[in-house]
Image (tube, grey):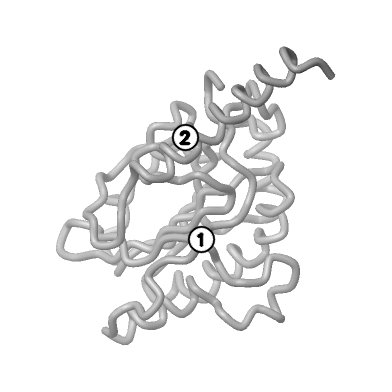
Amino acid sequence: MKKHTVLPICAFLLTIALMSARYASDGYKVGDTIQDFKLKNVDGKTVSLADKKDVKGYIIAFTCNTCPVAKAYESRIIALNEQFAPKGYPVVAIQSNDAERSPGDSYNAMQQRAKSKSYAFPYLYDESQAVARAFGASNTPHMFVVKREGNEYKVAYIGAIDNNQRDAAAADKKYVETAVTELLAGKPVTTPSARAIGCGIKWKGV
């Protein structure tokens, strides 16, 4: 390959990396109060965090249909909801990929996925990507645990679900599970962040 061909390709890849880093670094940090949002669920209804008055917080999962890593963690997200929704920390899943770049993540595909996997939690379409940008989500999956304080929600954990992508049973650091368990016990979160590993969110205009 000629040198003049390599340079534009390198510049293009660098631009993608810089944009992903910017979105990841500009979002909420642990301790921040988040802004509520309203997004369309797969059932056609609009959902916001304020809808549930009896929750203690939320497990917010930025995920998608198509990423192999998101698929590997899908059953664990379902399990987190089963474990913690009855205790006041339900899951809210959000899909932010641009459907033009990733047709398998279209709203119709989301509806089919939620139905086939019997999701017992909202699966919301962040079509404008404004919510992902506000949170600083960069990967699928990318997890945020938020704790309710009065009528506000503060970030208590950001990052990965656990430390073993391939095998849930082999994970010896279950970051989200531990964080929520500690919050329910009235304790500080001992590991408030861990690097999220997964596919990069497919941003519009990239």
Which residue does the image show at 54% across and 41% down from the upper left? 95
Percent x, y for residue 25?
Answer: 38, 45
Q: Residue 201: image x %, image y %?
A: 56, 38
Q: Which residue was labeled with disc 1? A: 195
Amino acid at circle 2: Asp
Quarter-of-image position of residue 55: bottom left
In this rendering, would 205 be left or right of 144? Answer: right
**Quadrant position of residue 107:** top right
Separation of marks 2 and 1 at Cα, in angstroms: 22 Å
The furthest residue to the front: 3
Tell me which amino acid carries mark 1.
Arg
Disc 2 crowd rating (10 Å Cα; few below 14, some 14-19, many 20+) is many
Disc 2 target residue:
126
For marks 2 and 1, the one nearer the N-term is 2
Q: Quadrant of residue 164?
A: bottom right
**30 left or right of 193?**
left
* Quadrant location of the N terminus in the rendered image: top right
Image vertical order of residue 177 relative to residue 95, above or below:
below
